[in-house]
């Protein structure tokens, strides 16, 4: 998705979502990977797809 066709409000939402993924979700994945409590590869794939769409 190109950000150029989004409104300013939508661009702010996208930026906040990306920041959240990088600052909140990524550290959790690192912890889960060390614990192996969840299928980390599946989470990475899902988050990666989400970030590409958003």
Image (cartoon, rainbow, N blue to C red):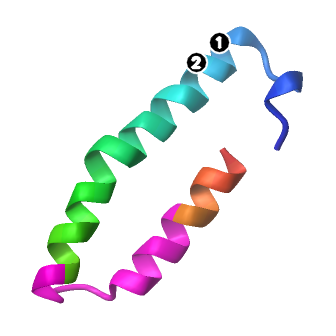
Residue 20 at what x, y percent from top left? Answer: 37, 39
Q: In the rendered image of this protein, does residue 7 appear above or below residue 53?
A: above
Q: Is residue 10 left or right of residue 16?
A: right
Dot 1 corresponds to which residue?
A: 9
CA gap between label 2 and label 1 equals 5 Å
Quadrant holding the N terminus: top right
Q: In the rendered image of this protein, does residue 22 appear above or below residue 50?
A: above
Q: Main secondary structure of the magenta part?
A: helix
Label at residue 12: 2
- Crowding at mark 1 (Cα within 10 Å: few <14, some 14-19, many 20+): few
Which secondary structure, mark 1?
helix
What residue range appears in magenta? 34-47
- Work out which residue is located at the far right of the displayed protein and give it: 5
Q: Are marks 2 and 1 in contact (CB under 8 Å)?
A: yes
Task: Tell me which corner region of the image, top left, top right, bottom left or bottom right, holds residue 43.
Answer: bottom left
Q: In the rendered image of this protein, does residue 17 appear above or below residue 15?
A: below
> What's the residue at 25%, 85% (across, down)?
38
Magenta-colored stretch includes residue 2: no
- Crowding at mark 2 (Cα within 10 Å: few <14, some 14-19, many 20+): few
> What's the residue at 59%, 31% (across, down)?
14
Nearest to the observer: residue 23 or residue 13: 23
């Amino acid at each position: 998705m190109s950000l150029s066709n989004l409104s300013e409000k939508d661009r702010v939402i996208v930026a906040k979502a990306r920041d959240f993924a990088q600052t909140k979700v990524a550290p959790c994945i690192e912890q889960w990977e060390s614990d192996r409590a969840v299928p980390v590869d599946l989470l990475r794939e899902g988050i990666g797809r989400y970030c590409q769409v958003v």
